[in-house]
Image: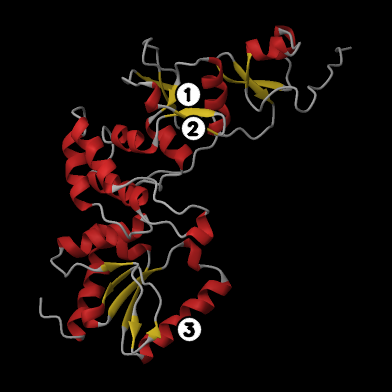
Amino acid sequence: MPRLRTPLADGLLPAVFSRAEAAAAGVTDERLRAPDIRTVVRGFYARAGAEILERDIVAAITRNDPRVAACGPTASRLWGFPQISGASAWMFTDSASRIHLTDPVVRRRNTKKLRWRNLDLTSSDLVEVGGARLTPRVRTWVDLAATLSTDDLTAIGDHLVRKPRGMFEGRGAPHATLDQLRQAVLRHHGRGALRLRHSLEDIRIGSDSPAETRLRLGVLRAGLPAPALNTAIRDDGIWLGEPDLSWPEWKVCVEHEGPTHLTKEQQEEDIQRTELRNEEGWIEVRTVAKDLRSSCARGVERIATALRRHGWRG
């Protein structure tokens, strides 16, 4: 008859823990081989069946090695950067994307689940968030230049410099300033340096999402006038909101229909706002995901048509 094992007490160990942490808590190597415990990565464990977050794994690894920090795509996800083209949310599975880590001293071998880099980092290049050590936001953006496109870097740059909506986000300042991005680009001479410089030229304060960034870039590259970004509009003293993109001279604006517009309450609010704008003589172009394909070709054509209806002769 198999020997019954006492379940691990709640709170005895963190979500992901090392062999050393287990030993300090009185959990033997034999106990770690029991079926109610699984190996997450070599030398680190978790309770079988428990939901494992990327942050839990990074916290455990960096907690047990003061030199190590998350970087690149992993730091990007932990910071909550906007999802880049083709990216998906990270989940702990056998096919999950590798966790990206840096050890500035020791060259480590990549594994199925861990991807190592040797970045030249100082103490100021590391921060701790929720128990996980990682590269700061601006440094993470710079490191991503090795693999991301210019437009993806621009979308993240827009995210970093956008002015937050304090009542919803609990902060009053942007994550970074344009000057901080500029200084970081000037210091960077590694892979992706040219893409960073081009991206910096396109970053603007005002885009609240990657979709808005892509629409703005598509509009400008097609030769349309530069739009105002999330700027309040009033017509004869009537408040008409803050459209994603707008051209007050021609009374044209754009609202992109993203996931936040799917609730019944938001849809009702959007309809009322659209009707009010129409009454004041504005054309509101409402774009969807299909309008962003092929360099926003359909979205750009719809916007251009609206502008021409109101007198633009470009």
Q: Which residue is mark 2?
A: 96
Looking at the image, how many numbered discs can be counted on the residues? 3
**Could you tell me which secondary element the residue under label 2 belongs to?**
loop
Q: First in sequence: mark 1 or mark 3? A: 1
Q: Quadrant of the N terminus?
A: top right
Which three-letter amino acid code belongs to the residue tagged 2? Ala
Is any atom of residue 33 visible in this view? Answer: no
Q: Residue at x 38, y 72 (%)?
A: 242
Residue 163 vertical position relative to residue 239 in the rendered view, above or below: above
Protein image colouring: secondary structure
User: Marks 1 and 3, how far apart in space?
Assistant: 49 Å
Q: Quadrant of the C terminus?
A: bottom left
Q: First in sequence: mark 2 or mark 1? A: 2
Which three-letter amino acid code belongs to the residue tagged 1? Lys
Locate residue 106, reporting x and y percent: 38, 9
Locate residue 89, reporting x and y percent: 48, 43
In the rendered structure, find residue 98 and report the number of the disc placed on it: none
Mark 2–mark 1 CB contact (< 8 Å):
yes
Q: Which residue is mark 1?
A: 113
User: Which residue is outermost to the bottom?
Assistant: 279
In the rendered structure, find residue 272 and report the number of the disc placed on it: 3
Marks 1, 3: nearer the viewer: 3
Is any atom of residue 179 visible in this view? Answer: yes
User: Marks 3 and 2, how far apart in space?
Assistant: 43 Å
Mark 3–mark 2 CB contact (< 8 Å):
no
Which three-letter amino acid code belongs to the residue tagged 3? Gln
Q: First in sequence: mark 3 or mark 2? A: 2
Locate residue 124, reporting x and y percent: 38, 26
Residue 248 vertical position relative to residue 163 in the rendered view, above or below: below
Q: Is residue 165 left or right of residue 157?
A: right
